[in-house]
Image: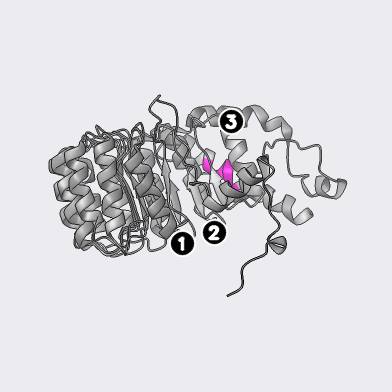
Amino acid sequence: MSGKAVSHTNIMINLNRVLSKYELQMKGNEDDDSEIPRAESVQKIYRLDRQDREDVVQDACEVYDLSEKEEFLQRCTNLGIPPFAMTYFLDNLSRGVTDLVLRNLGIGARGASAVTEVLAGNSNIRSLDMSLNNIQDKGASTVAILLETNRSITNLDLSENFIGKEGVDSISNMLTYNSVLTHLDLSRNNLSCKDIQFLSNVIQTVDSIRVLDLRHNAFRSKGGKYLGDMLGKNTSLSELYVGWNYFGDEGLKFLCSGLEMNRSLEVLDVCWNNIGHEGAEHISEFLENNGRLLELNLDNNHITDKGLTSIAKGLQVNETLRVLRVGFNVITSKGANEVLESLVSNPGTVVEKLHIAEVEVTTKFEKLFWELKKRNPKFIVLEMNTPGGEMYHFEAPPNAMKVLDRYLEQNGLNIDVSELQLDKP
């Protein structure tokens, strides 16, 4: 018990040292003779007083001096980081959490510097979430410096932080030193094609990143080329999320070109990307030649029945895809039927989940559905509609013998087979 308190004390001492250091940096080094206070000179620290501490723990915390509260608050103000955010951060560290979530705490670029300085000596944190904190390029660069030497953080979330090319380039440089980071989230930063060019080049040869999230940015066709080149050479990436961008058919062409050579990607999300029937043709070619992808999300694009016919052609030979999402496109029952016909004609298909939203179920579609269901009991279709527009619920066709038994019972015609006198030959 007392050991934990002492550990918390050490953290607070380190924090005040960091706060003092950045206070001096913010002054612009007006006094060249000024020195950063040494660790042993720091004596008084403010803490959140916890009433649940036992006496033995309180005794171990005698170094705290609550008279320094105002100084602590002022230092947090100088750094631009809210006091509640800093105390929340420290409390998480003192409890030894492994997933550190600092989302939407108003940390900012300067606060990110203080946070990463404290984390420099920490080896417990496995996942760091600093999303929605407006850390911008400067803050992203400080995080990159931390991860150049950190060997414990495997998941990093920097989404919604107004990061641009400078910040992404810093992260990219870090990846050439770091071999443990597996999940990188840079979504919702309004990144352009030029912003990710260097990142794409680096990930071509990096073999640690498994999951890359670039959703809700501003990539156009050239971004598809950069990412396509990356996929053509990368051997470790298993999940790529690039939905809510502007690739269009041309960008998807580049992306699929790289995918045809890729043998590691298992999940691809390209929803909301202005993809039409030409892009669907590229998807079809990719499905015919790639033997690895497990899940494909094409929801909310501009794919028509013509495009779905092309995709169906690829599904006739594909034997790896398990989840296909083509909901909220410009398709009708005709296109939906063709998809199921292609799956029925493919004896090696392993598709288990099909999302075709807001399309009416026809008798033909239902017949094909149960034919597939018989072969693969796990097969499901999501969000299809009845003729009246309501959600359709697939019900198994009735068993003929059960229908006969129910009819006989309801009409008092139950017959005891043992009482029947059958003519013997």
Q: Position of residue 169 (x, y in %)?
A: 26, 47
Q: Nearer the viewer, residue 218 or 417?
A: 417
Task: Quote the CA–CA distance across marks 1 and 2.
Answer: 7 Å
Nearer to us: label 1 or label 3 = 1
Residue 7 vs residue 419, the one in the foreground: 419
Look at the image and tell me whether residue 201 can be seen: no
Q: Quadrant of residue 318?
A: bottom left
Please tell me whether mark 2 sits on a helix, a strand or a loop. loop
Residue 204 left/right relative to 48: left
Q: Which residue is mark 2?
A: 123
Q: Nearer the viewer, residue 141 or 28?
A: 141
Label 3 vs label 2, nearer the camera: 2
Pointer 2 local density, CA inside 10 Å: few below 14, some 14–19, many at least 20: few
How many numbered marks are there? 3
Q: Is residue 298 magenta?
A: no
In what element is the residue under mark 1?
A: loop
* Cα gap from disc 1 to disc 3, whole angstroms: 29 Å
Task: Look at label 1 and name its amino acid.
Answer: Arg
Judging by the rendered image, the residue that carries numbered circle 3 is 83
Q: Which residue is mark 1?
A: 151
Q: Tell me which label, 1 or 3, sits earlier in the chain.
A: 3
Q: Picture coordinates of residue 28 (x, y %)?
A: 38, 33
Mark 3–mark 2 contact, CB under 8 Å? Answer: no
Kind of residue at disc 2: Ser
